[in-house]
Image (cartoon, coloured by chain):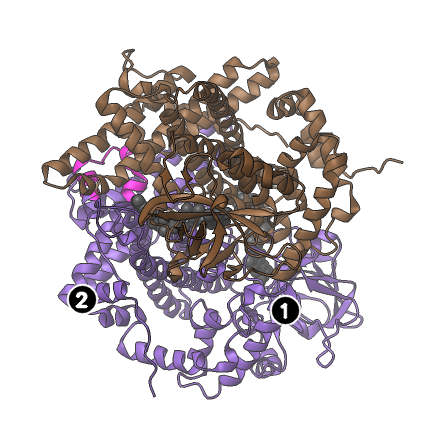
Chain colours: A purple, B brown
């Protein structure tokens, strides 16, 4: 027995008018026909389970009940892993991210950190023996962990972390301590209520010397009663703008003793007598950060895609006001102003995803060389991942709000899902590297490259400046050249500012600080260039039917022109913008593209 | 016994370094020394009441409990009215707005609509007899009302409202009906649970003819049991991004009969035999809209002020990262990037308030002429109020988010109060005229003025173009001239676009629609000009000590240059921006101003 699904007549008409094969785009986004099939099987398997539905919409519940409800569902989900049609690894990946998982666990996932941070930390930082001891228990959820890094006093500045782990050779133990209120861990997800173990980052002291931050495996709560162990001060930090069932927590230590073997010792060690053994390679942890940032980009893009889909469909269904006097009220999508709100974010969902895919491929290539001990590609990858994470998260957050507002009053309701999507996307502006701090790191790499004439592939344009004609043409290649010139121009302006500050007698750190606004602008131009280049190149390299190529090329063109119009001051400043391009920009907004 | 209040040492130092008299600025913002005293007395009276405190922070409660808690407090507040040191009217005003009221009723006010919309509607649209019948009951809270206009299907386009009120001369009653699902009222605050009466906007039918939308007084619920009356389908629309204790509701009518006398008949009437009598003046309702929009501007500005205060104080207290190697971690306020986030919104709190005050004065002047039957000032006032409401709400919403993000992770917590402030400010983008729709109305006025060479005071610059030198100087006056030229330039570009579209053969409505993006930009430039002019003029006219004048002038300069930098493309486009100004802009960000 198949249920008829109601289809709004306006939407139906739009879909019938679609000039390309939607399934082809779906496959393109999923990464292939098989991936689409696999995704749909998994979705059916999960979404058809009545027990995974909310008896009462989450937003009506108290803070405590929201958590209880998402915990109930996350336990059920874990039971479904074994029989999943998509295999455990793929299923876990879908359930932890912004896709399928968030359809069930709408306000966050109480055990996400276990899979996303705790297990990876064990694998990346634990010795083979340590992995043997904890990894299976972790996989079987006999223990549930989190990763405790940020403290009340320190998020950005990791060197400032205060939690202390002092080695006591007499008992062969570390003593964990929180020497002040600001030393309390603050923010780790799953810490508030769910986890009974944690990888805790602490300053390692041995033989009277501080050796910096190291990861320690610490049991927090009794495995049976779930009561905090002696000396462990733990709880939830409280309600937030979003992600309210992630039970972010706090954690203090009152002289908690743990065996020496609970220092995760893959990279550095403390011997029984207290001798500290340095890591052989300190750059490896960069690779993990690159990985996590790619995942953040994918997650915010997925969330943006949801927002755009909701707003686009609504704009085809909503009829309001008068366009032609006497006619029926138009679909609000017919207003140019509405298209101006929705088409750039639609284009961005493709641009961001293709850029993230591109970065992911670079990461995999680099990983191979790194396994051969070649670390040369790392700085470039690191720079790109910072830039892309900062750009995607902040632009996606703005776009989500534009989408919400484009739905008028109805967008403001929780049941539109916009408020929740925004809560997730805007959080990514702050975590995994606060965006301003990331921009400044990217800028440092750009300035260094430009001045020393040496750097990786992504910044080659700062070294070998294009000769080509200074005139501007409006082909995608011509416009890419413009983007490159703007990035170069803004880097040069920032450098001039730095030098100017030095001439005024500022110390280097002051000169840097007083050029921050220009440095950030330069870094942003670099990031936009990367996205735009990835977009253009990916379309060139992809095998697509001609109608799909045509619609995606239109979106690509719209996107690269949208950014020029949006930042036209920068383009004027480096004095390359011509009216031809502005006119082209105006034209692009007049084509009405719909994918609903 | 006085309690010592803890003062953070960093904040204390900043306050000691303050080069001006803070009390003077406070008085300036309050509108005089006496106003400050009065406000503080009222605050002490209200805030010291233990019963008005939340036993559990609101954000932990379920949706239903949040409402119950705010309803409890709003009833208590009403009991305190009689003994208030500030008088009933002033106290009510403070309790309904974004100031004192929101310190107690954090998620909204279940009876706000009663005072803000219901009573004013009665006063503005009811006859003397009708006022006699209901007004006293309303003042005594024997009845609690709301104002029901928006429907599920129509918010912006009021002519499209579907609720029907058909006159039946046989019984001398109106029959209220909701002919479809989309005809249900949807959104009115207080309707979901609190109100037992409403002024309902409905299409009036008499003698077989529709006479358009008119206000009807309708009882919704039993005065004793609070149960909905027969034929009344009423309830809450559900959780939202913010303002969750405003119990926005829905309302449907199943052939509900009300006496003829419940049509509010101050302006138009239906006689017993069904004859419709037209209103003598249809422009009067404009005046109410102007008033409400000024209040919206004041409210979002007050909310922005809170956000800026929280972020500025936090930035003086928070120490993070390294500025000078080896030194103590700096206050994050010392980073240029942080100043770049916080100083423009700080300046905006003054700019927006002074512009709203200015509009308020214009409104009062106009009101006097209107009472003499002179409506000439209305179109100009209407245009200004639309422009200012749209600008203040959207800019304030963005600024609030910038403030939140400037506090890193801690800004994301509910206890920072940012999420709640944002929920209130961003709602104002949509209600009381959706911003896009308002911009297009403003643009229509500007285009008309420019083409017909006739319009009110605020658009005089579009008629009598300034002669003066085309060169740019960087005095405030010189920069104001620049703003005016940009506004003129963008209006001309929009007109060129319109004419271009006409030449292509577009019908007028299509030509208009296809110029929307340019029209909106022009309207925004006009609005920014008004704010900037108000800021400069108000400072000129105010009596201020020289240190206070100096700090406010710096903020004013920073603000007008911030907008130039932010929209530098527009300024380049109209080709008047020079490097001199850009350099001045850079300079302004290097001065560190603090008011914490
Ligand atoms: C939803 C959410 C989930 C989180 N989950 C986790 C988790 O699971 N585990 C965990 O360990 N942590 C977690 N965090 C914490 C997060 O990693 C930190 O909030 C983040 O690192 C930012 O640090 P901060 O909050 O200390 O901000 P701060 O660094 O204090 O930032 C405050 C302001 O100072 C500015 N600033 C700071 N340094 C500089 C500089 N050098 N130059 C210029 N400006 C500067 C910033 O730009 C910002 O405007 C989470 C945070 C959020 C919001
Ligand atoms: C928090 C909140 C409280 C509210 N309280 C009340 C209340 O107490 N009483 C009450 O009666 N109502 C209330 N409302 C409803 C509010 O007045 C409407 O939401 C508002 O008028 C916008 O109308 P809409 O929702 O129909 O949006 P729509 O008009 O449907 O807007 C959808 C999209 O279409 C676009 N659009 C519409 N017309 C045009 C046009 N002509 N040209 C170009 N674009 C167009 C808009 O820009 C928008 O992007 C409230 C709303 C909110 C969010």
- Mark earlier in primary sequence (1, 2): 2
User: Which of B69 and A445 lies nearest the eye of the viewer?
Assistant: B69
At which x and y percent is residue B227?
Answer: 60, 61
Residue located 50% across and 31% down the image: B348
Residue at left offset 26%, top offset 48%: A335
Residue that carries the numbered disc 2 in the rendered image: A20
Looking at the image, residue A302 lies above or below residue A487: below
Instruction: Look at the image and give the residue range highlighted in magenta.
Output: A563-586
Q: Residues within 10 Å of mark 2 (few under 14, many from 20)?
A: some
Which chain is mark 2 on? A
Say which residue label 1 marks. A65
Q: Nearer the viewer, residue A563 or B429?
A: B429
Q: Secondary structure at mark 1?
A: helix
Q: Check residue A90 for magenta coloring.
A: no
Q: Residue at x 16, y 38 (%)?
A: A580
> Residue A210's spot in the image, x, y percent?
68, 56
The secondary structure making up most of the magenta span is: helix
Q: Residue A301 sits in which quadrant?
A: bottom left
Q: Position of residue A478 (x, y in %)?
A: 18, 46
Are dots 1 and 2 on a single chain? yes
Is residue A580 one of those drawn in magenta? yes
Whether residue A481 sits left or right of residue B35 in the image: it is left
Of residue A49 and residue A524, the one placed in the foreground of this image is A49
């Amino acid at each position: 027995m198949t249920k008829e699904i109601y289809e709004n007549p306006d939407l139906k008409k739009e879909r019938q008018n679609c000039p390309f094969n939607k399934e082809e785009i779906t496959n393109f986004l999923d990464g292939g026909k098989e991936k689409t099939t696999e995704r749909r099987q998994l979705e059916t398997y999960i979404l058809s389970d009545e027990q995974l539905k909310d008896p009462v919409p989450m937003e009506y519940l108290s803070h405590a009940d929201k958590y209880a409800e998402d915990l109930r569902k996350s336990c059920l989900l874990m039971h479904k892993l074994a029989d999943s049609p998509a295999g455990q690894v793929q299923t876990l990946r879908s359930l932890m991210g912004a896709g399928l998982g968030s359809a069930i666990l709408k306000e966050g996932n109480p055990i996400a950190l276990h899979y996303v941070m705790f297990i990876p930390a064990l694998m990346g930082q634990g010795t083979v023996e340590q992995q043997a001891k904890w990894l299976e228990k972790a996989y079987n959820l006999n223990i549930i962990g989190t990763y405790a890094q940020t403290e009340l006093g320190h998020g950005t500045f990791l060197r400032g972390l205060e939690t202390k782990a002092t080695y006591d050779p007499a008992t062969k133990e570390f003593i964990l301590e929180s020497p002040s209120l600001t030393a309390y861990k603050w923010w780790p997800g799953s810490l508030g209520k769910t986890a009974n173990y944690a990888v805790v980052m602490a300053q390692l002291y041995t033989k009277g010397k501080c050796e910096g931050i190291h990861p320690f495996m610490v049991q927090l709560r009794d495995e049976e009663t779930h009561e905090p162990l002696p000396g462990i001060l733990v709880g939830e930090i409280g309600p937030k703008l979003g992600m309210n069932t992630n039970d972010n927590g706090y954690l203090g230590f009152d002289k908690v003793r743990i065996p020496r073997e609970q220092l995760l010792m893959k990279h550095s060690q403390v011997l029984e007598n207290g001798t500290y053994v340095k890591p052989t390679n300190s750059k490896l942890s960069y690779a993990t950060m690159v990985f996590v940032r790619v995942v953040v980009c994918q997650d915010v893009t997925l969330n943006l895609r949801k927002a755009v889909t909701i707003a686009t469909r609504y704009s085809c269904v909503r009829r309001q006001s008068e366009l032609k006097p006497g006619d029926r009220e138009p679909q609000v999508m017919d207003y140019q102003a509405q298209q101006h709100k929705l088409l750039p974010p639609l284009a961005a969902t493709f641009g961001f995803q293709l850029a993230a895919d591109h970065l992911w491929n670079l990461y995999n290539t680099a990983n191979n060389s790194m396994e051969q001990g070649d670390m040369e590609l790392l700085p470039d990858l690191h720079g790109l991942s910072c830039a892309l994470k900062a750009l995607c998260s902040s632009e996606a957050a703005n776009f989500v709000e534009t989408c919400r507002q484009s739905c008028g009053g109805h967008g403001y309701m929780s049941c539109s899902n916009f408020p929740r999507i925004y809560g997730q996307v805007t959080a990514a502006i702050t975590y995994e590297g606060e965006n301003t701090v990331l921009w400044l790191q990217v800028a440092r790499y750009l300035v260094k490259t430009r001045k020393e004439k040496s750097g990786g592939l992504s910044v080659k344009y700062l070294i070998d400046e294009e000769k080509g004609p200074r005139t501007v043409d409006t082909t995608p290649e011509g416009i890419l050249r413009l983007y490159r010139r703007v990035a170069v121009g803004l880097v040069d302006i920032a450098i001039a500012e730095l030098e100017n500050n030095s001439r005024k007698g500022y110390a280097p750190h002051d000169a840097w600080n007083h050029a921050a606004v220009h440095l950030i602008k330069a870094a942003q131009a670099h990031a936009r260039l990367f996205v735009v280049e990835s977009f253009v190149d990916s379309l060139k390299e992809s095998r697509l039917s001609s109608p799909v190529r045509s619609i995606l090329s239109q979106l690509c063109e719209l996107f690269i022109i949208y950014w020029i119009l949006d930042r036209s001051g920068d383009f004027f400043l480096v004095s390359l913008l011509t009216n031809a391009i502005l006119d082209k920009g105006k034209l692009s907004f007049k084509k009405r593209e719909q994918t609903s």
